[in-house]
Image (spheres, rainbow, N blue to C red):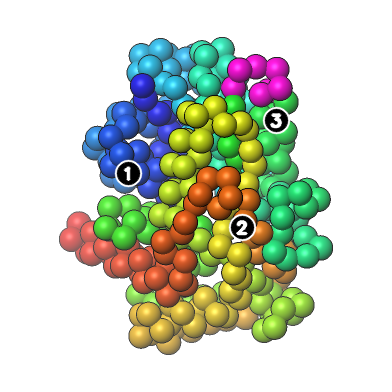
Amino acid sequence: MSVLVTGGAGYIGSHMVLALADAGENVVVLDNLSTGVRANVDKRAALVIGDAGDQDLVAKLVAAHDVDAIAHFAGSIVVPESITDPLGYYLNNTVKSRALIAAAVDSGVKSFIFSSTAAVYGNPETNPISEDATLAPISPYGTSKMMTEMMLRDTVAAHPLQFVALRYFNVAGADPKGRSGQSTPRATHLIKIASQAALGHRSHLNVFGTDYETPDGTCIRDYIHVSDLISAHMLALEHLRKQAGSVIMNCGYGTGYSVMEVIDAVKRASGVDFPVNLAGRRDGDPAALVAGAQLIRDTLGWKPQYADLDTIVTDALNWERKLVSGLTAA
């Protein structure tokens, strides 16, 4: 048996490949390398360059590699970009996911893990957010992910497929062993951008919005270490292979930090007081998103190992230094 990982050359997907390979699983990566990095794909996995929305290709891979589970990470993830290019996001995140789900059903795949997002909640009325909170996304990105959740829900009611959808909060950090990390040149993640500023690869850091109804006026997010996120995926795979039922769960710690608190943590870890510019709000940014995180603990027995902002920041900085060293060496 094998696990097919779409988007396995990307930030989060590459960490899933590492975890699967470390566990002795056979892994097939399907990635079009539009944002993924070939070098981040562990050599124990088979890399196929192609599109997750190519039903014929997916069917061939399922048959050739005896795929019993699909972990779907491929997609577009930048909220402001989704507002200016909604049709692109609905194509990449929704239409292609529909094709992938159809290929899974047609090929007899029984287990499907989906990367969803806290953006499905929009501006929640209360924090922490429980999974039964109203879904009211305020960006095409969030809507595109919500629509895929709905497709999965309806599909499993009609076919012998089970799924786990994990609603990510703010993923950050890097593999503690330094094997992978956030490598996308156009990445918009706060901790990566702050790390780049600390290492002198950005002249400054922009803070978008200082007038939110939060203690310091900046947005609050629940930051989760990528390795803890992936441990949840591995438990989700085990859950599905036991045919324990489909479920949608938040994946976060239940603790929020403001943008300014994150910047302070990066400055503390790096020892660099880099410039910070204050700017207006961006469209699509809720004031606060903090996970209600009990369901995933109860359902999967998930026990985070890296639930500390300083640890997350340190691992992210170490990866960024490694990238800088690689560029310097080249």
Q: Is there any visible trace of residue 231 in the rendered image?
A: yes
Where does the magenta region start and end?
Answer: 155-161
Q: Nearer the viewer, residue 61 or 153?
A: 153
Residues at marks 3 and 1 touching, judged by CB atoms closer than 8 Å: no
Q: In which quarter of the image is the N terminus?
A: top left
Q: Which residue is drawn at 61% across and 64% down?
A: 254
Question: Of circles 2 and 3, which is in front?
Answer: 2
Relative to 63, is 298 on the left or the right? right
Count every numbered label the image shows and give the total: 3
Q: Which residue is drawn at 47% across and 66% down?
A: 307
Q: Is mark 1 on a helix, strand or loop?
A: helix
Mark 1 neighbour class, 10 Å CA radius: few under 14, some 14 to 19, many 20 or more: many
Question: Which label sits on residue 18?
Answer: 1
Q: What element carries label 2?
A: loop
Nearer-N-terminus badge (2/3): 3
Residues at marks 1 and 2 touching, judged by CB atoms closer than 8 Å: no
Kind of residue at badge 2: Ala
Q: Residue at x 71, y 50 (%)?
A: 131
- The relative height of residue 186 versus residue 115 in the rendered view (above or below) is below
Find the distance from the CA under tag 2 to the CA under tag 3: 21 Å
Q: Residue at x 46, y 42 (%)?
A: 235
Q: Mark 3 points at which residue?
A: 153
Nearer-N-terminus badge (3/1): 1
Nearer-N-terminus badge (1/2): 1
Mark 2 neighbour class, 10 Å CA radius: few under 14, some 14 to 19, many 20 or more: many
Q: Which of 242 and 269 is in front in this view?
A: 242
Question: Which label sits on residue 146?
Answer: none
| Image location of residue 65, percent across then percent down | 35, 18
Q: Is there any visible trace of residue 167 in the rendered image?
A: no
Q: Name the residue under label 2.
A: 293
